Image: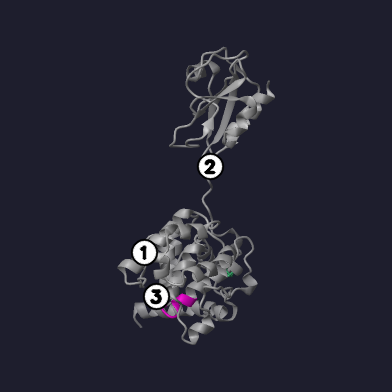
Amino acid sequence: MSRKTAASSAARAVAAPLLAWYDANARVLPWRTGPGARKSGARPDPYAVWLSEIMLQQTTVATVTARYQTFLTRWPDVSAMAAAPVEEILGEWAGLGYYARARNLHACARKVAGELGGLFPSDEAGLRALPGIGPYTAAAIAAIAFDVKATAMDGNVERVIARLREVRTPLPAAKPEIHARAAEITPRERPGDYAQALMDLGATVCLPRSPRCMLCPWAGACRACAAGTAEALPARAPKAARPTRHGIAFWAVRRDGAVLLRRRPDKGLLGGMMEVPSTEWRAEPWTLGDAEAAAPVAARWRLVDGTVRHVFTHFALELRVAAAPSGVAEIADGVWCPIDRLSDHALPTVMKKVVNHALGAR
Ligand code: SF4
């Protein structure tokens, strides 16, 4: 037996219990052509498969289930969607996540209807060349719509394969290894059913916290189940400790009681939002003497007791607040806002904390 034939029959042997389980337990989903229908010769509509896969990107099955049919009724084929104004697609998309995905949906429909004669490509490379289709979606569409052998890897499938083969390398470094293990067991027979079986196994049996190994068709083959390591896999690299940055915010109140705000630069963190003026946010704590050069107006600044703390994704911020005991002079820059009108400005949360801290200290 050649190496290729041996690999193919090994993949078939691993896939067989999963496919048998899928035949009996496949989820009924509105966009799915189930295993029974496929055996009777039914074939999925590539447009419907594509539409469902785009809708499912970062959106739950339950949410998409409630909305998919409306899309399909309004735009029953790719030509109908291509002919629709993009505003109508965006309007129907409300609540389904990033509008960029809806724009790509429309751009993709136009490309398929206009340049490809209304036919979706059947291979991963051709699909990936279309707007809004990445590696996972291309593999899923190729497998499900065209029964092409393709390995669709998302977080659920990564988890199942990491456990089945007991890949202990932490993510994200383990991704190439997990992908290789997944690819070597993807069968040539029924690749569309196999891809959906893996999705169903990850969603209903091989759950992140409590895998239901007793119900799993791969329980006998699963290395993590045998070793008792399933719940700990896939391993994840510890997150790098979040650094702390420091700053001083200047609570400048004019003699008539108006508070000085300014708009942050459009680019960067909190871009374009209003703020209480502050120093740069840096790794070393500031002394008031250092910080005064960055004050928006000259005054006899005093530090208010206490610290404002806020956690951003990549760092924790500790802000001291400096206030001038008597009113500060008028300056042309910035926006002077009466204290009782501060809520008119959509201040970011960290700046609301600064306002509350300064008001609490008065
Ligand atoms: Fe996941 Fe358990 Fe099945 Fe292994 S046996 S694939 S850990 S559910």
Residue highlighted by disc 1: 110
Q: Is residue 59 above or below residue 222?
A: above
Residue highlighted by disc 3: 148
Mark 3 C-beta closer than 8 Å to ligand 1: no
Residues packed near mark 2 inside 10 Å, few (<14), some (14 to 19) or many (20 plus) = few
Q: Earlier in the sequence, mark 2 or mark 1?
A: 1
> Ligand 1 is in which quadrant of the figure?
bottom right
Mark 1 C-beta closer than 8 Å to ligand 1: no
Q: Quadrant of residue 228?
A: bottom right
State if disc 1 and disc 3 touch (CB < 8 Å): no
Q: Is residue 9 above or below residue 244?
A: below
Q: Earlier in the sequence, mark 3 or mark 1?
A: 1
* Disc 3 element: loop
> Where residue 40 sits in the image (x, y, percent)?
49, 87
- Badge 1 amino acid: Arg
Q: Nearer the viewer, residue 153 or 47?
A: 47
Q: Nearer the viewer, mark 2 or mark 1?
A: 1
State if disc 1 and disc 2 touch (CB < 8 Å): no
Count of marks placed on residues: 3
Distance, label 2 to label 1, CA atoms, is 37 Å
Assign the C terminus to one quadrant of the image. top right
Mark 2 C-beta closer than 8 Å to ligand 1: no
- Badge 2 amino acid: Thr
Indicate yes or no whether the magenta region holds residue 358.
no
Q: Nearer the viewer, residue 119 or 285?
A: 119
Q: Is residue 167 above or below residue 194?
A: above
* Residue 173 in view, yes or no: no
Residue highlighted by disc 2: 313
- Badge 3 amino acid: Val
Query: For the magenta stretch, what is the residue range?
Result: 188-193
Distance, label 3 to label 1, CA atoms, is 24 Å
